[in-house]
Image: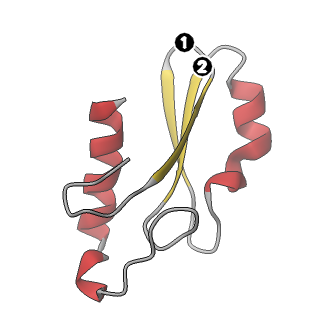
Amino acid sequence: MLMDDGVDIFIDDTGHGPAIILAHEFGGDWRTWDKIARDLSQDHRCIRFSARGFLPSDVPVDMALYSQDRQVRDVLAIANTL
């Protein structure tokens, strides 16, 4: 999913029902949630993503494209779009 600053964020969207967005910690990626998403997707829509800087999402060189505020905006954009 292309963010408003041109960074492409990888998203995995599985399951049906009420949506849950699973955000990984530093040092992980979208696969951090494999087992939990497998279980929850039986009756929930599980939206997982790799944050900017974590493959397979874009890894911008410009440090100005990283911040806590930017992370929040990315999650909100994902929620609003999906």
Residue 68 appears in which quarter of the rendering? Answer: bottom left
Going 49% across and 16% down the picture, which residue do you hit?
18
- Residue 23, given in percent of the width and then of the height, sits at 52, 52
Q: Is residue 2 left or right of residue 42?
A: left
- Residue 47, given in percent of the width and then of the height, sits at 53, 36
Q: Nearer the viewer, residue 77 or 62?
A: 62
- Residue 71, given in percent of the width and then of the height, sits at 33, 62
76 up-or-down from 26: above or below: above
Dot 1 lies on which element? loop
State if disc 1 and disc 2 touch (CB < 8 Å).
Answer: yes
Q: Which residue is mark 2?
A: 44
Going 37% across and 29% down the picture, which residue do you hit?
82
Going 44% across and 68% down the picture, which residue do you hit?
58
- Residue 57, given in percent of the width and then of the height, sits at 49, 62
Q: Earlier in the sequence, mark 2 or mark 1?
A: 1
Dot 2 amino acid type? His
Q: Which residue is mark 1?
A: 17
- Mark 2, Cα crowd under 10 Å, few <14 / some 14-19 / many 20+, is some
Dot 1 amino acid type? Gly
Q: Nearer the viewer, residue 46 or 55?
A: 55
Going 19% across and 55% down the picture, which residue do you hit?
4
Residue 12 appears in which quarter of the rendering? Answer: top right
- Mark 1, Cα crowd under 10 Å, few <14 / some 14-19 / many 20+, is few
